[in-house]
Amino acid sequence: MGIVNRAFAHKVSGSLCVLRIALLLSLLLMTVTVFAQDGIKKSKKTETFEGKKYYLHTVEKGQTLYAIARAYEVTVNDIVVENPSMMDGAIKPGDVLRVPFDKKGSITTIQKPPAVDTSKKFIVHKVEAGQTVYSISKKYNVSLDDIYNNNPESRTAIRPGMELKIPVAKEGTANVAIAPDTSKTDSVVSIKKDVYNIALMMPMQLWNVANIEPDDIVLNPPKAEFPQKPQAAVEFYEGALMAIDSMRKAGMKVEVWVYDVDDLDSGKTAGILAKPEFAKMDLIIGPFSAAPFDEIADFANAHNIGIVSPVSQANRVLFKNPMAVKTLPSVGTQMEQLAQHISRERKDDNVILVTSGLLKEQKANSSFRNEMDRLRVSEGKDSIKVNQGFSGIEGKLFKDKMNVLVIPSTSQAFVTDLVRNLYGLAEKYQITVYGMPGWMDYDNLDYEYLEALHFHFAAPYYIDYNMPVTRNFVKRYRSIYGGDPTSFSFAGYDVTLFFLQQLYGTGTGFVPGVTEKKSEGIQQSFSFVRSDAESGYENIGLRIVHFSDYELVPFGFENPKPKQK
């Protein structure tokens, strides 16, 4: 559902309390009014349609699709696919819904194909990985409705291997594949407007609002807690609103549309793309998840709309979408940037990559090692040393040099044991450890160890609370929302402000120019590169942080290199 934005002065961040939960719920309810109602009873009315039995449920005031689905022990998608007019999740009192009588007969296990007009001719298309309904419609030069009407199950989701009936194009046209225009963004026309339309697409999960119990969340933590996705979405939205307000004060006129989009309800995406206002957007921020982002990015690419992935690390969201931009670097990119930092700042040090041996961490290890070796070979140096675990590591240490140990592991058990052992060597050797940001959250990792080992890490997110701009933001945030901002609040502000500045300064064709626009937000650094000639742009901006006097400080500001012993 799309709505025009209104300013919300609500507190939704900070510690969990009754007021916080109540206000967060009220924010969600301002978008779609939902009344909690328990005890929904199954209807006694039934009908048989095309050999399949259904309940006929009449919607009453306050009922939601989620609550109805729960009462009949089916999923929301089971109901939506049998009632295509409800595909955007909007129901009202008096609507009559067809609910599968037997869950085994619902769309999740349907065996026979839907009835089709045999007078028509079809092409059978086998869905490939990464394809969306929108991209398939473009491939065969047909409309979304042509696919949905002949393949009802595609309204809910498509998956690799699924076969779709594609109607033969009308006379005078052809079902031909449209090759991607690899020079698309190089020739995008940039238009400056009096008023810009932007879409914020976030997982508010409004369908679940009626099932959230604030008292239970407050009285029974952590067993009961507020859903993480909508909490993050609202916190991001708060920061975005502050950025929008800043740009409005700078003279920019912005119309904001908010859409509730989540990967749990894939059928909603098609309904949003069909809305007439959506093709008029000048900037799309979101969705948060890669799956719905892919389909919306196809649409954005076809309509020359810049689209931003604000929190996903997945590089797939950029593939063959030259109007797509991703603000969170992938793990591989982070490791490559860390290698460049160490190659630049630790030229004469003894660098050792320490691995855990875990399969899930091989990507990070290989990204760092390959980039580090590439840089060293170009300087005529040997490859870096590699050691698995702690055993044998002392034999690779030098007493007359700084030993830089890079440990790209997120295994708490491995890290705490390794760091404890390295601490024992810190009296004999000069050691600097580069690890991961998550280490700061390990309860059993003593800060004394991190101080002694001069702990560093590369962070896509880092906030220096001593900076005046940070203090001003926190003060302003508190005055509006009554509590402290979270990481998602800062992300909402940084991302929205940066891209509104590009839109306002350059116009609608701003995307190709982001590679020339480096910027420092409160929490994020922005520096973009294009992934390849046919795809979009990834942010490679990172901040190197280190532990000094038991505080985290930016590299290069306070004691950037440990003193030599």
Image (cartoon, rainbow, N blue to C red):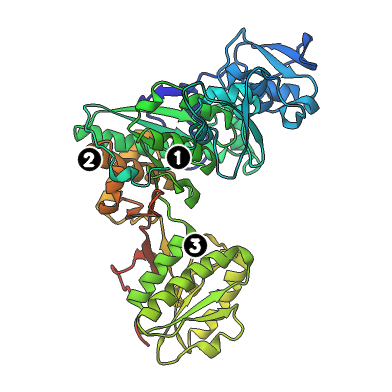
Between marks 2 and 3 in the image, the one whose residue lies nearer the viewer: 2
Nearer to us of marks 1 and 2 is 2
Secondary element at image label 1: loop
Residue 506, disc: 2
Q: Is residue 423 left or right of residue 242?
A: right
User: In the image, what residue type sits under mark 3?
Assistant: Met
* Residue 248 image offset from top left, x and y in percent: 24, 32
Residue 413 position, x and y percent, is 63, 67
Q: Residue furthest front?
A: 172
User: Residue 152 placed where, x, y %?
Assistant: 64, 24
Compared with residue 523, is residue 80 higher up or lower down, i.e. above or below? Answer: above
Q: Earlier in the sequence, mark 2 or mark 3?
A: 3
What is the distance, in whole Å, between disc 3 and disc 1 at their CAs?
21 Å
- Amino acid under label 2? Thr
Label 2 secondary element: helix
Q: Nearer the viewer, residue 414 or 315?
A: 315
Q: Secondary structure at mark 3?
A: helix
Q: Is 107 situated left or right of 136 in this image?
A: right
Q: Is residue 546 above or below residue 273?
A: below
Is residue 519 visible in this depiction of the protein?
A: no
Decide: is 525 above or below 361: above
Closer to us: 333 or 460: 333
The residue under the point 54% across, 90% down is 395
Disc 1 and disc 2: Cα gap in Å?
34 Å
Return the residue at label 1.
Answer: 13
Instruction: Please report whichever mark, 1 or 2, sits nearer to the chain's N-terminal start.
Output: 1
Q: Is residue 232 visible?
A: yes
Task: Check disc 3 and report the residue beneath it.
Answer: 440
